Image (cartoon, grey):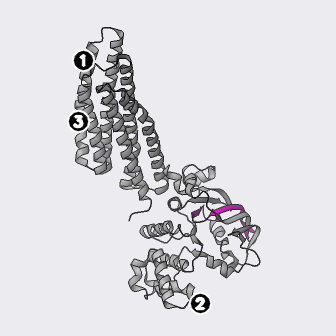
Amino acid sequence: MNRYFHKELEEIRSKLILIGEKANQAGTLAVEGFIESDLEKTLTAVKMDDEIDDLEVEIDRDSVRYITLRSPVSSDVRLIFVAIKASHDLERAGDEAHSIAKRTRSILQREGKVANKVAIEEMSRLAFAMLRDALTSFLDENLKLAEGIIERDKEVDRLNKENFKTLSKGMEGDSIEASTQIETILISRSIERIADHAKNLAEEVIYLLTGE
Amino acid sequence: MAQSTDTEKKEDGRDIIEVRDFNFAYGNSQALFDVNMDIKEKEVTAFIGPSGCGKSTFLRCFNRMNDLIDIARITGGSVKINGIDIYGKEIDVIELRKHIGMVFQKSNPFPKSIYDNIAYGLRIQGIKNKSTLDDVVEECLRGAALWDEVKDRLQESALGMSGGQQQRLCIARALAVKPQILLMDEPCSALDPIATAKVEELIHSLKKDYTIVIVTHNMQQAARVSDRTAFFYLGKLIEYDVTDTIFMNPNNEQTEAYVSGRFG
């Protein structure tokens, strides 16, 4: 039997998808700002952070309310648990997007354009594909897709290490370039963290679907 | 925010029941102390509290069911419904109870057919027209989410129905005389979880047309079905607020202890 309050569970689910889409959009814009030296995209990404933060707070409140008032069990309680954990991961992914955008803005304001893109483009392509697939696996309840995401994190980690090596080798030189290199290392690190959050989300979807 | 929209929307709702400084006793034993409460129209209000706290006594004051107990007496205060003091001298108690239906802990269908259970109240009001009665029976059974289950056996005895169906029949019977307020005294305590869920669904759907006041021992039920909750203890109204507040962040320590299962 479908209870009248089950629609509240659907609302939490919808909000989780929304925060995921926003985190993905903010991250994609931030990285595009870096790759294309587009200040406007970075500024849009920076602005999205507050919306993402607000959504996380809403999901937490709705979830606590549902647990308190609706006595959920079984897959319903797993969904609530996943909503709380996943919204935190997605909010953190949004924070990384915010950080990428701010660092890109700093590079663009100092140098006008990004000269050394190292493996950022390839890395972000992989990381955001992971994030989108993790969201799709949640939306479609697709266990196989979620399971496949876990392994994909390794390639993002490898690219991050490669970026670190490449950028730290060229640290000598004038201080402006060194700042840019450090910021690029941190942007790479942020993308690597976004992939970690996508991996976490995939693990949460696996828990939601299997209880394990 | 999703959590309080239901209640916030009704913040301006009319107070259909207004209780002021209400005191009530059984003989020398005071059962209710200085209760003040406003109940909003077309909302579900739940009374919770440990056994003997006075919640059922209080509920029964709204349709003067306590008049039937010899030693029961009001020792102060007033209860107004639609602005009228229901304990006023001019009040016709039978008329009052037409406006305030009641559903009890144990379902109590008449030993008659399903149809006649619903039609009974109308017949004693003098309504004899068969097509009118047919319409009301169908409307009430539909209103009580029972029509589809019983439409092919309306002439069968109500006593052959399941406990959950009997309770919903009693709700349908109460609806037949078009009351404004429905009082429910632990309506699900004798029902299994599925029948309980059906009655809760029914309560949720009925609140668009009726004001419902429910006494329940089941705190999760109060949390699920009500817009506002009142917590009683030892005859006193300890806290009364929107249900979200009572269960998520009550102001009173005793309420907190009770809803979290630490006493009671």
Q: Residue at x 33, y 49 (%)?
A: A208
Up-down: is A63 above or below B234?
above
Q: Is residue A75 magenta?
A: no
Q: Which residue is mark 3?
A: A152
First-in-chain label (1 vs 3):
3
Residue B165 on image: x %, y %: 45, 77
Question: What is the crowding at mark 1: few (fewer than 14 residues within 10 Å), some, or many (at least 20)?
Answer: some
Q: Residue at x 40, y 85 (%)?
A: B153
Q: Which residue is mark 2?
A: B126
- For mark 2, name the chain: B
Q: Is residue B25 magenta?
A: yes
- For mark 3, name the chain: A
Number of the front mark, 1 or 3? 1
Secondary structure under badge 3?
helix
Secondary structure under badge 1?
helix
Region in magenta: B24-50
Question: What is the crowding at mark 2: few (fewer than 14 residues within 10 Å), some, or many (at least 20)?
Answer: few
* Amino acid on which disc 1 is placed: Thr
Residue nearer the viewer, A84 or B163: A84
Q: Are marks 1 and 2 on the same chain?
A: no
* Amino acid on which disc 3 is placed: Arg
Q: Residue at x 66, y 71 (%)?
A: B62
Q: Are marks 3 and 2 on the same chain?
A: no
* Amino acid on which disc 2 is placed: Gly
Task: Give the spatial CA distance, label 3 vs label 2.
Answer: 77 Å
Report the magenta stretch's main SS: strand
Secondary structure under badge 2?
loop
- For mark 1, name the chain: A
